DNA sequence: AGTGACTCTGCAAACGATTACATCAACGAC
DNA sequence: GTCGTTGATGTAATCGTTTGCAGAGTCACT
């Protein structure tokens, strides 16, 4: 029951010109005489003509869309970044195609890159095999948040620096026994936040005890799990730096459900500054990543690469910021410093 | 610096057959003789040939993608639904194109529908002008969560019933003074949750006082705002049913920051069961919407419509469920029932 | 009047696949 | 030996644009 849609031929016939002229009247208005243009536009209005994007793209050898590879679409962390991305891509004439790399079969990934399905790709998943992205005849690629090696351009924050700021803040508030709830093993963010935390602690002359490192995956549940581990500890850290806000939220929640008070009994710092952080009880002190801006810059740099037909381009490091809220307080007096 | 990619012609030449045979060997393997097929496949491997989707789609008169119109991409409520959607669309051979209807200019919307950019559309934004969707020569459209009139098929939950369940639960727990934190005006979800709440209250012989209705927009901030209003009330409801979990979270947070205790001083019920709800303090009692399943069913129904070349199709109502957690308790004894 | 220069438009060739139709060989039945 | 059938392949049209090239007209200047 699909209507037959008007083609450029119909418009040409109706306005008494050739299809070439119709095409020009629409995409290069200044290359066609005023009266002709008007006739064409009238015919366009009359037929309701809209150019077929497939045909156009085939001819122009482009696709008009950008592909975002997201590790897990269900993770709200990405939604705001995608929103920033869309806000710059749409005006630039690109559609945003989204694929979830965890639910997609792995082989599909190279397909995405080689098929010419997109004019450019934004990769949010640093765990993708690097060689998959190294394939030739691929469109420009930019990494957002996560990154790999030095080869591909990326937009991200200085994660290690963020971790250092978090640790130093806890130290300034008097904490000497500091733990860390990690992200997933093998992830660059995990590694560099851990490294930053470790570096800061060493600079302060504090040990990062192995049993104060809680393995996780950035998720809520892994925060709860860390809380359970914390509860079982004989010697507990008085503060925990969580590798993500979600984890911090799960951690605080589980602790409080168990009757532990935050920040009186234990202080918590997160990472990301997701929207809910300010509304938690207590409001979460955290390291803010400018997520919307990450999306925007990724989009801008990528369009520039496409424009320039370049496979490489500049990277960008955006600033992080410590957001002080109420999940951090001086450590409980009874516990004192380590010797 | 873009590599010249292999076309079907190259494969044909290399394997010594016609392009027709190459095409058949790839898309209808059983229609071509065994040895020929092998020769073709070998040539494909050798050249690294991947069919150009633009050309294929042009010829097949399809696009291979589905468009999701989301009111606000930054809202995590949608991420899990989109994830469910992607999980059924990808295996079915469709890409997921996403557009944010709030950042996109309005005119763009009709363009999206009429341009033939997508083989089908999932609309999450019930506030779109209905006539925009009524346009002819549009692809199949399905509404998810929100809905309009009776014309278009939709996948959603029974919002009014959900609201009734919430109210009845509060009533069973002893509450007689019940308020409601609304969603945005003019939204169908807002209307039907409000209507459900009102109906349940009337059935129980309880008034829904005007000053116990807090206007909002489903967001966190509007929850905080409702809390401020609540604090300023002379006569306060002992329980508030919030139209979304985000709002409930903002509401509880702000109340607790002001020293009010949940659920001892006031009980709260949310709507949605977003992931964080279980990790809040106290864990939030809420009405669960099967979000991932909403996405999945929307995808399935939409593919069926596309398959059948039908502009209409069945709607689907998915069940809601009361998730009892700890944000609801009997009302404080001192306040008693209304006369 | 001849000559560039310039503007506007049309012709027709891409773009890269799919597929209706034609062709041809092999085969079995009569 | 002929005919119809079947299966594999090739030929060429088609999808709906964009765009290089060329032709036609106009104008100004020598």
Image (spheres, coloured by chain):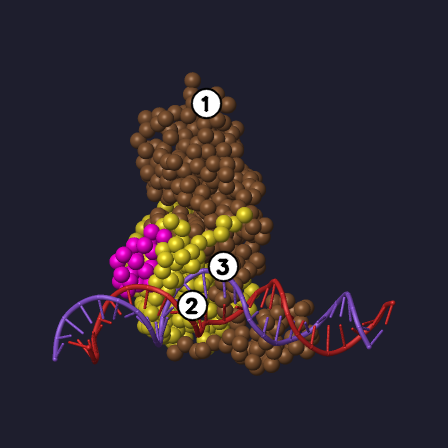
Chain colours: A yellow, B brown, C red, D purple
The quarter of the displayed image where residue B315 is located: top right
Per the image, label 1 sits on a secondary structure element best described as: loop
Foreground: B37 or A152?
B37
Comparing labels 3 and 2, the label whose residue is closer to the camera: 2
Foreground: A65 or A275?
A65
Per the image, label 2 sits on a secondary structure element best described as: helix
Which residue is outermost to the top?
Answer: B339
CA distance for labels 2 and 1: 67 Å
Q: Residue B63: which numbered mark, if any?
A: 3
| Rendered view: B293 above or below A142 | above
| Rendered view: A297 above or below B142 | below
Residue in the image at 50% along x and 46% along y: B142
Q: Is residue B111 visible?
A: yes
Per the image, label 3 sits on a secondary structure element best described as: loop
Q: Position of residue B187 (x, y in %)?
A: 41, 38
The span picked out in magenta is A24-43
Comparing labels 3 and 1, the label whose residue is closer to the camera: 3
Question: Does the magenta-highlighted stretch encompass residue A305?
Answer: no
Q: Position of residue B33 (x, y in %)?
A: 69, 74
Q: Which residue is mark 1?
A: B206
Foreground: A156 or A304?
A304
Q: Position of residue B68 (x, y in %)?
A: 46, 52
Q: Compare marks 3 and 1 and give the one earlier in the sequence.
A: 3
Q: Position of residue C12 (x, y in %)?
A: 43, 72
Q: Which residue is mark 2?
A: A59
The overriding secondary structure of the stretch rendered in magenta is helix
């Amino acid at each position: 029951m699909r209507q037959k849609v008007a083609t450029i031929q119909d418009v040409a016939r109706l306005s008494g010109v050739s299809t070439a002229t119709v095409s020009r009247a629409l995409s290069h208005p200044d290359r066609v005489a005023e009266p002709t243009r008007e006739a064409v536009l009238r015919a366009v209005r009359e037929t309701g003509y809209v150019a077929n994007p497939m045909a156009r793209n085939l001819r122009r050898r482009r696709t008009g869309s950008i592909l975002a590879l997201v590790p897990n679409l269900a993770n709200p962390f990405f939604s705001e970044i995608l929103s920033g991305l869309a806000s710059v891509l749409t005006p630039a004439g690109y559609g945003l195609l989204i694929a979830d790399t965890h639910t997609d079969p792995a082989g599909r990934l190279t397909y995405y890159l080689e098929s010419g399905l997109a004019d450019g790709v934004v990769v949010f998943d640093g765990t993708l095999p690097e060689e998959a992205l190294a394939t030739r005849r691929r469109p420009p690629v930019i990494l957002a948040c996560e990154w790999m090696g030095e080869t591909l351009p990326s937009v991200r924050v200085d994660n290690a620096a963020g971790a250092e700021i978090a640790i130093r803040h806890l130290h300034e508030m008097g904490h000497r026994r500091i733990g860390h709830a990690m992200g997933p093993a093998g992830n660059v963010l995990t590694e560099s936040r851990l490294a930053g935390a470790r570096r800061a602690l060493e600079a302060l002359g504090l040990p990062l005890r192995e049993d104060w490192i809680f393995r996780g995956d950035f998720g809520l549940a892994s925060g709860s799990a860390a809380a359970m581990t914390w509860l079982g500890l004989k010697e507990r850290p008085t503060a925990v730096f969580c590798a993500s806000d979600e984890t911090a939220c799960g951690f605080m929640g589980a602790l409080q459900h168990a009757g532990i008070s935050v920040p009186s009994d234990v202080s918590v710092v997160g990472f990301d500054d997701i929207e809910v952080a300010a509304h938690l009880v207590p409001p979460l002190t955290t390291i803010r990543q400018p997520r919307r801006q990450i999306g925007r810059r990724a989009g801008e740099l990528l369009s520039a690469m496409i424009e320039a037909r370049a496979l490489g381009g500049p990277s960008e490091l955006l600033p992080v910021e410590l957001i002080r809220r109420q999940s951090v307080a001086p450590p409980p007096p009874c516990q004192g410093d380590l010797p």
